[in-house]
Amino acid sequence: MHNSLSNLIEIQKEIQLKINTKNSTTKIPKIIAVTKTHPMTSILPIINHGHLDYGENKVQEAMEKWGNIKIDFQHLNLHMIGKLQSNKVKYAISLFQYIHSLDSLKLAEKISSEQIKQNKKVKLFIQINIGEEIQKNGIYISNLKEFYKKCVQDLGLDVIGLMCLPPNNDNVSSYFLKMQNLITNSDLKELSMGMSSDYLQALDFNSTYLRIGSKIFGQRN
Ligand SMILES: *Cc1c(COP(=O)(O)O)cnc(C)c1O
């Protein structure tokens, strides 16, 4: 068995075990296998195993890697998880089913007009700048309600949840808790948080989409 497949199965078991001990009605989260920088030879074993969700952070790389594969495997879900530039939106709408990095009104407007042109809708996560870090992208909590309303009511976007990349120097659980509270107090259901280093903690706060790269495919160069 290829390493990436045995790693994925290991992670799935670990998640199932943790959910069993939580004795709650926690949904099993989806695992987005983050394939950035990794070649198709490492990815195909898990595609053939039946895994459905894949994440990339650059549109250009995603098009080169997934353009043809998506023709043969149309049921796969591709997730854009990185910063999305306005001039790449048309390609992103045509390739991806989910975008996790909706982080500005300008981007929201561009996505809206491109969706109309292509007669296609993607599912969106609003990226929250949960640590209020100036070097990171995302909407501040204080602006979320107004931003969400504009996206949904004025622009017709299909916003399904919230996403964050918490500060990595601090207590990550406190940020995950803030994210969970935002969801509890909204109409949204999905929570995109947790990576290789902290996905089990993210589970404690009912994350529904874990974005896991190196733990499945190994270190990136
Ligand atoms: C690369 C990346 C991940 C996965 O990171 P790992 O530590 O390799 O699991 C998750 N989310 C985003 C936004 C990323 O860019």
Image (cartoon, grey):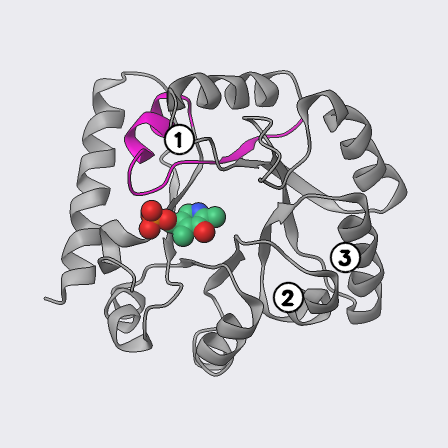
Q: Residue furthest right?
A: 154
The CA span between labels 3 and 2 is 9 Å
Disc 1 Cβ-to-ligand 1 distance below 8 Å? no
The CA span between labels 1 and 3 is 29 Å
Q: Is residue 104 left or right of residue 97?
A: right
Point out residue 221 in the picture as x, y percentages from the top left corner: 29, 64
Q: Is residue 23 above or below residue 36?
A: above
Query: Residue beneath label 3, please?
Result: 111
Secondary structure at numbered mark 2? helix
Q: Is residue 51 left or right of residue 159?
A: left
The three-letter amino acid code for the residue at tag 3 is: Ile
State which tag comes first along the sequence, 1 or 2.
1
Residue range in magenta is: 187-206
Query: Residue beneath label 1, please?
Result: 27
Q: Are marks 1 and 2 in contact (CB under 8 Å)?
A: no
Query: Residue beneath label 2, please?
Result: 92
